[in-house]
Image (tube, helix red, strand yellow):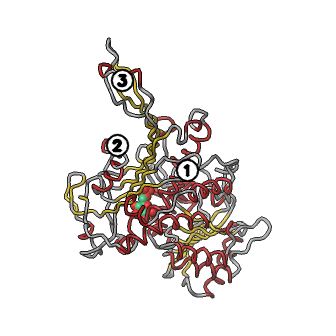
Amino acid sequence: MARKKPDVAPPSIFVIFGAGGDLAKRKLFPALCNLKRDGLLPEGFAVVAITHQPISDEAYRDYLKTELPEITGGDFGCQQWETFRSHIFATALDFGEADGYLELGEVLRRIGAQLAIPANYLFYLATPPRFFGPIASRLKEAGLTEESGEVWRRVIIEKPFGQDLESARVLNRLLHANLEEHQIYRIDHYLGKETVQNILAYRFTNSTVEPIWDHRYIDHVQITVAESVGVENRANYYDATGALRDMIPNHLLAVLSVVAMEPPNSFEADAVRDEQTKVLRAIRPFTPEDVLTQTVRGQYGPGKLGGREVAGYRQEPGVGGDSKTETYVALKVLIDSWRWVGVPFYLRTGKRLPGRYTEVAVVYKHAPNAMFRDASFGHRDLPANMLVLRLQPREGIDMTFNAKVPGHRMKLGTVTMEFHYEDHFGSEPTTGYETLLFDCMNGDATLFKRADNIEIGWEIVEPILDVWSALPTRNFPNYEAGSWGPKGADELLERDGRRWKDCSIDCNT
Ligand code: BG6
């Protein structure tokens, strides 16, 4: 997003640690294939898949071919698979063993010479986070992170970036001991979503939007990330993590920051990230009392979703029968800035809600409807205008406003003007990783998180984690699978004379 992007990424070798895992197969290879399909990868490009067990190049290519039938055909696919496959290599490595990294260096030099690729390396750590520090330090010892002249070396990591503020700081220190900040690309896949980026375009390129984007016109903002899935097969990770850590310091605060940030003076990575960090810093810290009145946690019990019975969280495989882990969280967040004084941001996210639905609803203040005060005109309480930025599904922007119902009497009704991206720009299937990988290859860090941004996210949620762990909940499960979450979440808004936008009609399960 920062500078004008080149048509094709510069030549490089893309090295995947943990190439036998889910992320490589579900996201990284499909994304690389889509980049190839769209002509965004250069001739000089290779992938080196690092696995635990030794496997030949051919065997790994065959594994991809069977695991990802879509890459060899179909709409989604990599039509150029046959040429692409010869640029995919596999090598085994014990992450902790120093000698292996010297051999890896040899492998990269050999492939580089064979395919005439300069020594630009992008290391994707698709591994459990406990390996981030050790891999970075071994790469450095082997000279693989050293940049010189035009040659670049970059490392991509993905959340979780720690479990709390302290562990996030430790991780940042470990990374900084081995890499410069400009070499570290921390992925929050929400920032890769087309519509999240479009919030910036919508806000800052339309002269009708920004002048009324503040406390004078906006009553409050709701950010909803609803998921119909349960814990799936991730109980191990999720039960130790919970909805607050899993979603708030990263995805929801990322969305909040693009909605609430001040206009940056350029679209250079640091200009954008400075503004995002600034707005997060302006969030009023939660006192223990705020945690009791401004946060709600929930856990799903058994229920019905999409016409079928589903188990409660405590009955999911791998979850203890007395688990206290929250699968739902709602927060009222206040931003102490000139622009947002007195405008609450209500955030909610949860599993086993009625559908997969992500949106930002900006609710404007009521117009002074004095001239329509006479009930005979129709509505005494006209709904306030609402702007809905729909992130998924059916990405788009909706605006509701009031209009006169045709007829002899002055009767008013609320209508919605809808814009869907697909209708206007069409759509190619993507994984959400294409933009992020392409940007990283081009050295554009705008959509990646900086160390300070990660730490501020944890600073915001830390007081909540403290109070919640000191006061374990006694009422779990407190919402049925297939419902919109615990009653407390409704009460959170009712106390302020507001209510959650009804998303039921928009959900697709
Ligand atoms: C991940 C969380 O980061 O984001 C998951 O760990 C969650 O629990 C997922 O399901 C949601 O992402 P998306 O793109 O499906 O909204």
**Disc with the residue nearer the chain's start (1 vs 3):** 1
Mark-to-mark CA distance, 1 and 2: 23 Å
Q: Amino acid at mark 1?
A: Val
Identify the residue position indicated by label 1 in the image.
258
Q: Relative to the observer, which residue lies in front, 362 or 24?
A: 362
For the question of whether residue 275 can be seen, the reply is: yes
Q: Quadrant of residue 209?
A: top right
Question: From the viewer's perspective, is residue 118 above or below residue 209?
Answer: below
Upstream in the sequence, badge 2 or badge 3? 3
Q: Position of residue 153 (x, y in %)?
A: 69, 69
Mark 3, secondary structure of its residue: loop
Q: Are marks 2 and 3 in contact (CB under 8 Å)?
A: no
Tell me which residue sits at (51%, 46%) in the image.
195
Q: Are marks 1 and 2 in contact (CB under 8 Å)?
A: no
Residue 506: which numbered mark, if any? 2
Q: Tell me which amino acid carries mark 2.
A: Asp
Q: Residue 41, how many percent across, how many down? A: 62, 56
Instruction: State the residue at coordinates (38%, 70%).
Output: 468
Against 100, is 495 above or below? above
246 or 64, nearer to the observer? 246
In front: mark 1 or mark 3?
A: 3
Q: Nearer the viewer, residue 389 or 51?
A: 389
**Residue 395 seen anywhere in this rendered image of the structure:** no
Q: Nearer the viewer, mark 2 or mark 3?
A: 3
Report the front residue among 107 and 352. 352
- Per the image, label 2 sits on a secondary structure element best described as helix
Q: Is mark 3 within 8 Å of ligand 1?
A: no
Q: Which residue extends farthest top?
A: 408
Question: Ligand 1: which quarter?
Answer: bottom left
Q: Which mark is residue 373?
A: 3
